Amino acid sequence: MGTRSAEWYGGAGRNSYIHRAWMRRGLPAHAFDGRPHIAIANTASDLTPCNSHLDEVAEHVKRGVWEAGGVPLNLPVVSLGETQVRPTAMLWRNMAAMAAEELLRANPVDGVVLLGGCDKTIPALLMAAASVDLPAIVVPGGPMLTGHFRGVPLGCGTDVWKLSEEVRAGTLTEAEFMRSESSMIRSRGHCNTMGTASTMGLLAEVLGMTLPGVAGTPAADSRLLEAAHASGSLAVEMVAEDRRPSAVMTRGSFLNAVVALAALGGSTNAVVHLLAIAGRLGVELTQDDFDRTGSGVPLLVDLLPAGRFLMDDLHRAGGLHAVLREVRDLLDPEAITVTGRPLVDWLGAARIHDPEVIRPRETPLLESAGIAVLYGDLAPGGAVIKPAAASPHLLRHRGPAVVFDSVEDFHARIDDPDLDVTPDSVLVLRGCGPRGYPGMPEVANMPLPAKLLAQGVRDMVRVCDGRMSGTAYGTVVLHVAPEAAAGGPLGLVRDGDMIVLDVDARRLDVEVPAEEWAAREPSPAMTKAFAAPSRGWERLYVETVGQANTGADLGFLTGSSGHPVPRDSH
Ligand code: FES
């Protein structure tokens, strides 16, 4: 079978002449003799600081591609800097995925190396690769090295909040706070806590989509460049063997990722991303799989935000493979990697070098980590809670609702001394789902009312149709589906309604007489706060985005469409 790129370059006609001639700017004639052309989907950008080193990584991928007899082609794709992009990078994840998919389909390429790092970039690239289903391999950009301030390690993101709280409490001067800024981001790479970027880089490997043993390698580590080289070579081999994402990312691979997500203590955002990637492939994966397969898995990794260490420590302690080896019996032995060999085949030599960072299976940090999926009056489509991050005494709770109609409403009233709120209240924030506040912002872990904080209250039950940062925790019910803006019952709750959370029973209900509930209408104040964009991507997004329980992808992008060669109009 000829290569896909040969459809462009083969033959002596005018069209193939044009395709070749313009590419001769740097490529020799033999580049068009039928050898694989490998795109390097590169999210390097000065506005995505976590990925700004990927141009250097791409150079090493190129060497590997040439060495294996392929032709490497740098393909800059949409990049999303989590800290820079407003209102939230998640609004643009699907756009990045769609753009990358279409660029891969439109261009004369046979395979692709995916370079990502910052939160949304690896999910978007995997969604694109799943849709176009060309042989693909991920090189995760890797986390930053650990920075220090006052002699102690700093966790990106997590410690920004801690230090700013210290300023508010008067235990840190503003000048010192400013001084910490240059210590926070010590090197190239993405956030070094177990946030979304770290989680998704590691899960890319568990899905089988990286060279085994690469994920979690710090961005500044020379071994990342060696891995980039080897990944370039492997991409050429994958084209020869026609090994595509649909063969690698099977249901078994996704269930392996669910197990790993729990053992790693990864971000809840991974639920939405994995559902979206599976949706692109047509692989059957539901939110319930996270509960069924993941909730009984032990937590083995002691990383910030919930724990003590950072990604550099995880790598030193044995890395992802040492973690996976502990839960090997829970992994699908058939699920293959980009190498063609099963993931479990690569775990034999792994060892835990620091049991403080990676706990052995016999002495886990928690017996049952993972995610619980709740259903009930308030969440007919399901909602998510991470019991390990919640306060045990709140896992069964009954309390009156204090309702906020939007993020703005929340900020305007939460610290009002007259707000009718007690430690037993349940804070409800709605209008923050994919449609209501496009992109589904990370606001579910609402800050507690100042007057309760002053009383020493440190956690309350919170319910929201939005997401929460991978670096946050608390008794937070999030991703409530359907969201209020999609007609979900969360939109009918009123102040004072009794809300009942029972995590053991997997329930989230409201105690309102059925007739009264049936007669309720959404409040105009709430519906007025929903987004109503008139044009552009945001409008397309709001009109077509699905709910969190299916990955919040655009409805018309689910299901793999493969890589037919487009018509030639030259
Ligand atoms: Fe890029 Fe945290 S800001 S990973």
Image (cartoon, rainbow, N blue to C red):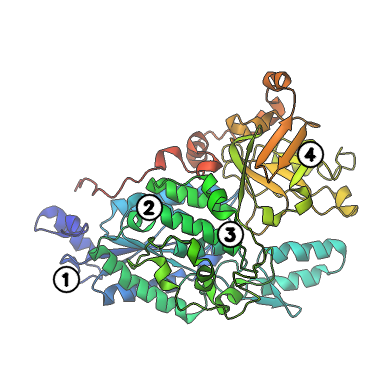
Residue shown at the point (76%, 41%) measured from the top left: 427
What residue sits right under mark 2 in the picture? 130
Describe the element under mark 1 as helix, strand or loop. Answer: helix
213 or 509, which lies in front?
509
Disc 3 residue lies near ligand 1 with CB under 8 A: no
Q: Nearer the viewer, residue 542 or 491?
A: 491
The vertical placement of 387 against 556, above or below, is: below
SS of the residue under disc 2:
helix
Of the image marks 4 and 1, the number of the one nearer the N terminus: 1
The reply to whether callout 1 and callout 2 are in contact (CB within 8 Å) is no
Badge 3, how many Cα within 10 Å: few under 14, some, many 20+?
Answer: many
Counting from the top left corner in percent of width and height, residue 92 is at 51, 49
Label 2 crowding class (10 Å Cα cut-off): few <14, some 14-19, many 20+? many
Residue 374: x %, y % from top left: 63, 42
Which of these two is toward me, 363 or 169?
363
Indicate the amino acid at tag 3. Answer: Val
| Relative image position of residue 122 (x, y in whole percent) | 47, 59
Please report the residue visible at 29 percent of the width from the left and 51 percent of the height from the top.
106
Q: Distance from label 1 to label 2 (Cα)?
A: 30 Å
452, above or below 53, in the image: above
Which residue lies under the disc numbered 4? 398
- Which residue occupies the foreground of this view, 89 or 512? 512
Q: Locate residue 198: give its quadrant.
A: bottom right
Question: Real-space Cα distance between discs 4 and 3?
Answer: 28 Å
Distance Cα–Cα, label 4 vs label 2 = 43 Å
Residue tagged 1: 30
Q: From the viewer's perspective, is the residue at label 3 or at label 2 nearer?
A: 3
Q: Mark 3 or mark 2, which has the lower sequence index?
A: 2
- Residue type beneath disc 2: Ala
